[in-house]
Image (tube, grey):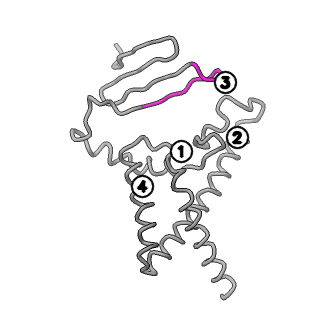
């Protein structure tokens, strides 16, 4: 016997277990299916906080994943499309874009820490806002990458500062 409670309608199926509800929608424009998972309101975080704290680092990685033009994570780039491309090429393209994105995030973090150590309250406030936003969304939401869109201007600001500092050290040194 399955541990899931199953509910069906014309366009979606709901799978419910003790801590999550997953909706599978079959009415997407490209004929595929979408999966959406929510925390079951019957399972409060207070009863098992370690489970939600342990998944926060993964949520942080998912939250800061690169996006494609639809505002979805890059992992959905080849979902149901480009059937003629070999799997190794799809994986290579995705890995290359993700690698460039993590280099971007690394330079932005370098700029963020460089500005924090200048002890200017305005920069500290912006950095605090970014860190707070990431922690709250990694802990208390399902950390979709589209949630970070409001923070991207600040990421670009700190990237520019980090890149400027790296170039000035390269030219001087």
Residue at the extreme right: 84
Q: Earlier in the sequence, mark 1 or mark 3?
A: 3
The residue that label 4 is drawn on is 133
Q: Name the spot of residue 60 as percent of width and height, x first.
A: 45, 51
User: Residue 52: x, y in percent?
Assistant: 32, 44
Question: Judging from the image, what secondary structure is the residue with disc 2 in?
Answer: helix
> Is disc 2 in contact with disc 4, using a CB cutoff of under 8 Å?
no
Q: Earlier in the sequence, mark 2 or mark 4?
A: 2
Q: Is 9 displayed left or right of 27 in the figure?
A: left
Q: Nearer the viewer, residue 154 or 111?
A: 154
Q: Residue at x 63, y 39 (%)?
A: 70
Which quarter of the figure has residue 84? top right
For label 3, the residue is 30
The correct choice, above or below, for 83 with respect to 127 in the image is above
Q: Which residue is mark 2?
A: 90
Q: Residue at x 42, y 72 (%)?
A: 124
Q: Which residue is mark 1?
A: 146
Marked residue nearer the N-terminal end (2 or 3): 3
Tell us which disc is closer to us: 2 or 1: 1
**CA gap, disc 2 to disc 4?**
32 Å
The residue segment tinted magenta is 27-37
Q: Position of residue 150 (x, y in %)?
A: 52, 52
Q: CA distance from mark 1 to mark 3?
A: 20 Å
């Amino acid at each position: 016997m399955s541990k899931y409670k199953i509910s069906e309608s014309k366009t979606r199926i709901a799978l419910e277990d003790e801590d999550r509800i997953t909706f599978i929608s079959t009415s997407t424009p490209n004929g595929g299916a979408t999966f959406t998972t929510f925390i079951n309101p019957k399972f409060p975080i207070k009863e098992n906080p370690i489970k939600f704290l342990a998944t926060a680092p993964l949520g942080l990685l998912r939250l800061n994943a690169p996006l494609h033009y639809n505002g979805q994570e890059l992992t959905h780039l080849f979902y149901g499309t480009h059937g003629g491309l070999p799997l190794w090429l799809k994986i290579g393209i995705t890995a290359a874009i993700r690698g460039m994105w993590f280099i971007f995030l690394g330079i932005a973090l370098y700029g963020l820490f460089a500005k924090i150590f200048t002890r200017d309250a305005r920069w500290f406030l912006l950095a605090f806002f970014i860190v707070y936003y990431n922690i709250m969304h990694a802990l208390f939401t399902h950390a979709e990458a589209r949630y970070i869109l409001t923070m991207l201007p600040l990421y670009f600001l700190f990237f520019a500062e980090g890149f400027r500092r790296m170039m000035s050290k390269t030219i001087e040194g």
